[in-house]
Amino acid sequence: MIKNTPEYILKPSLIFNAGVGCFALTHVPAGERLVGDVVPFSTKQLLESEIPDSYLKYCVFLENGLYLAPSNFLAMSVFWYVNHSKTPNVEFMGNKLFAKHD
């Protein structure tokens, strides 16, 4: 079931140099669907040299020096703020985002 009340917030991370992250406002049980469809979203492929250093952490490395990037860094969807951890707590199934663990 998709909830209609805000359950997350975008805010600065307390981790040094981590930037902005997506944080839960309430307990989210494992398997809970977090948001509506997050794909498709507007993207473009860029070389690393075309991406400002401060935005690189929001991009997904593809291959051969190419990155998947938001089409507009000034209007990014919540997708770009989620799951930048080496031990992620969310996962994608199809084009939907779910809590991986409590």
Image (tube, rainbow, N blue to C red):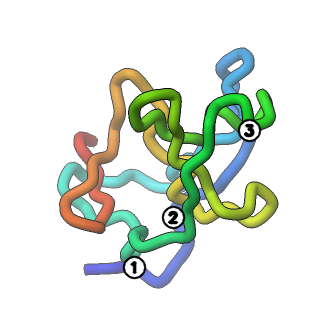
Which amino acid type corresponds to the residue marked 2 in the rendered image? Answer: Glu
Q: Which residue is mark 3?
A: 50
Marked residue nearer the N-terminal end (3 or 1): 1
Which amino acid type corresponds to the residue marked 1 in the rendered image? Answer: Lys
Q: Residues within 10 Å of mark 1 (few under 14, many from 20)?
A: few
Looking at the picture, tell me which residue is in the foreground, 73 or 97. Answer: 73
Quarter of the image holding residue 34?
Answer: bottom left
Marked residue nearer the N-terminal end (3 or 2): 2
Give how far across and how far down residue 16 sits, in percent.
71, 15
Up-down relation of residue 56 to residue 99 (above or below): above
Which amino acid type corresponds to the residue marked 3 in the rendered image? Answer: Glu
Q: Which residue is mark 2?
A: 7
Give how far across and how far down residue 83 sits, in percent.
44, 40
Give how far across and how far down residue 32 sits, in percent.
25, 61
User: Gap between marks 3 and 2, in whole Å?
Assistant: 34 Å
Q: Residue at x 67, y 33 (%)?
A: 56
Q: Which residue is mark 1?
A: 3
Q: Quadrant of the N terminus?
A: bottom left
